[in-house]
Image: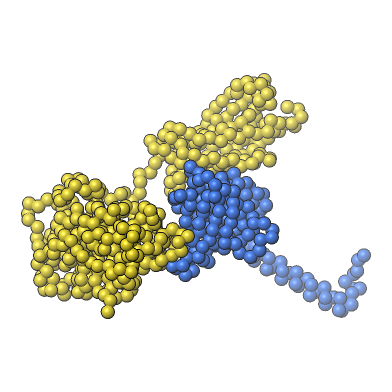
Chain colours: A yellow, B blue
Amino acid sequence: MVSLTRVFIATTEGPSEIQRIAEDDPDVKSVICLNGTAEALPVSLDYHSFVRKPTGVVERLFGCPTYRVDVSRRISNGQSWQLGLLLAHGLHAQGRLAPKDGPADEVYWVTGEVRHNLDVMPVDHVREKLRQSESLFDGLAHLHTKVTVLVPDGNFVEAEAEIRALGLDVNLESVRCWDDFGPSAQDSDTPAPRKKPWRRVIIGVLALLLPFSAAAVLGPWWKADVPKAISVPLQPTLHSAPVAAPPTLTPPPPAAEPPKDSEPIPLPSPAVHAPPAAVPEPPPPPRSAPAAPPLVVSAVERRAPPGSGCGRLRLTGASTVDSEITASTDGFDTRSATGLCEVEFRVTNPSTERRFVSIAVDTTIEGAAPLSASETVPPGGSISLTVSPKVWDGAKSWKASLTVSDALGQRTGGEPPTSPIKPKTLTYIADAPVEPRFR
Amino acid sequence: MSNSWSGLNAKQKSGITAALEALTALDTLSQAIASGPPAPRIAFRDLLAWTKGPAVNLPIAYKQALLANPTLRRDFDRLLAKTAEWRCERAAAASSGLLDTRDGSGFRVRLKPSRAAQGQVYLLIEFTGDVPVAPPRSLAVTCADGDCVRLELPEFRDGSAQLLSDENAEVVRLLRDPKTEIFLW
C-alpha cells in the first residue's frame, strides 16, 4: 500500500496545506488557488514561471506545462514556497500526495527557494514560520503523525534552534540541492521523470535529541490546553515564563539568553537569501497607515475686468482678474456669476508623498459635459479642471458639483473611506437677470 | 356628448360603478407602492466613483438609474469610452449564441473552461498586436440593459493576463453575450 504524505508550505501567517495538484490545459497559465475556489493567489504568476519551461523546473522534472494547485491558506510574495511545491509535485507524480481531508501517513513542513539549477537556497523568517506553525505541530504530535521539517541547508542551524526552543516533536532535515533529494532530471534526455520512481534520499539530516519523553507525560495537559486552530498565534515559550503557567515541553532557557528575535543566526555557508544575522525581524506592518492630510480643494475664478467681457477676452487673449477661493468641508460659498469667464477647480496634494487623485466636475450649464481627470499628483502639486460658462450666459445662475477622491479612498475633508463621496458644490448666482442680447 | 346618470340603465350604472371601484383600488395600490423608501438618486459622480473604486458588479440602483435615465446612460457610456484605452464593440449582428472569444481593438478576450476544476473558467486577456508599455488594470463589460461588471486585472506577462472565475459569474455571462461591450483601461 502506498503511503501518503501531506505537505505544508511554511508561511509567516501559518502553514498552508497543499490540498491538491491537478494538470490543466497547456493553453492557460499555472495557478495557485485558495481552497478549491476560483480565487487565484497573486503568487500564481511566479508559480507559472516556476512550472513552465524554459524558466521553470516543474515541467522539466515532471513533464506537464500547466498545473492548478489548491492550498489552504494564502501564500504571499516571496519564493520560499518553491521547495514545498516541488516536493508536492514529486509526491503527486508518484500518487503519494495526501488529498485534502484524506488520511496521511506523514507530514512535511517545508520552506525553501529552488533555483533553476535545482540548488535549494536559504530563506528568511524560518523562526517566525515555525512559531506560527506551533499548534499544527502540537496537533500532529498528539495524533502521533510523523512530522518532518524540511529546510535549506543554510537555514538548518536557525531551524534547529527554534525547534529546540519550541520543544517540537519533529524531525529536522535539510537539503542543499534537489538533485540530492530526488533523481536528477536536469538532463533533458532522461526519461520523463514522472515514470521514474521518486526516491527520498535525505542529506544533511540531523535528528534532534530533545526531551521528547516529556511529551508523553504532559500529553493530557497539552490536549486540554493547546488551541486546535492552527491560525491561533501561540505565545513563544522563550518569551513567557509566568509562575502559574502550566509546564511546557520546552526546557527553560538560560537566564542570560537574549530574546531570540535578536539572536544572531549563524549560517554555515554564504547564502544569497540568508537573513542578516544580527538584524532583528522587522515588526509587522501597521494595520492601517497614518491618515494623510486631506486634499486641498480650491477654485480660481477668472473674471473680465471692468468695462470688458469674457467674449472679448477670449478673442484678444487679454488677462483676466483672478481670485482663488478655498473650499471648506461643506463646500464653497455662493458666488456671483457676473463677469465670470471661467473657473479652474484645483486639488492640491499637501502630503509628502505622491497620491493618485481623481477629480470630476458636473455642472448645470446647459449642454456642458461632465469633466473628469485622474493622475498621480506629486507632493505640493495639483490637478485641475476648468469650467467655462457660455460667453453669452455669464449672467445666468449655475452650479458645479466637484467630486474628489484619491487612491486610498480618502475623501476631501478627511471623511472616513467608508462614507459616501460627498461632492463640494459651488453655486454662482446671477446678480440681475439680463437678457443675453443686451450684454 | 354627455349622459346624465339618471339617463343610464341599470347595466350601464353597474359597469361604471365597477370601473370606478377598480380605479380607486388602483390608486390605493399605487399610493402604497409610491410611499415606499425613495430610490437613491444616482448621479454621474457615483458612476465615476464606481469606475475608480474597487472592482465590483454595478449595484442594482445604478443599473436602474441607467435604464431610467437615458442621459445618465449616455454620460456613462461616454465616461467608459473616454476612460478606456482599448475597446471591444458588440459582436456582429450575425453572431448568435454564446461566444468564447471576443476580439477588440488590439486585444482578445478568451474564455476557457478549466480542466482541473469543474465549473470554473479562465478569462484570458491577450494583446494581439504590440504589447503596451502600460498594460490595462481594469476591465469593464457593459450591456445595453444596464448590466455592467468591472474587474481588476492581474499583472500582464508576455502580453497576456489571466483570471479565474466561476462559470456562472456575471462577468462570464456578459463576456459571452455578443451584445455586450468590453472596455480596458
Nearest the eye: A293 or A380 = A380
Q: State the quadrant of the C terminus of chain A.
A: top right
Nearest the eye: A115 or A402 = A115
A55 lies above or below A290:
below
Nearest the eye: A391 or A278 = A278
Is residue B6 found left or right of B120 in the rendered image? right
Q: Position of residue A377 (x, y in %)?
A: 46, 36
Q: Position of residue A400 (x, y in %)?
A: 59, 39
Q: Position of residue B7 (x, y in %)?
A: 91, 73
Q: Position of residue A171 (x, y in %)?
A: 17, 65
Q: Residue at x 65, y 49 (%)?
A: B74
Is residue A317 found left or right of A210 in the rendered image? right
A21 lies above or below A314:
below
Residue that lies at the very extreme toward the front in this rendered image? A189
Asked if one can make out residue A314 in the rendered structure from this viewpoint, the answer is yes
Residue that lies at the very extreme toward the left in this rendered image? A255
Residue A174 picture quarter: bottom left
Residue A431 picture quarter: top right
Q: Residue at x 9, y 67 (%)?
A: A211
A425 lies above or below A166:
above
Q: Residue at x 14, y 57 (%)?
A: A161
Q: State the quadrant of the N terminus of chain A.
A: bottom left
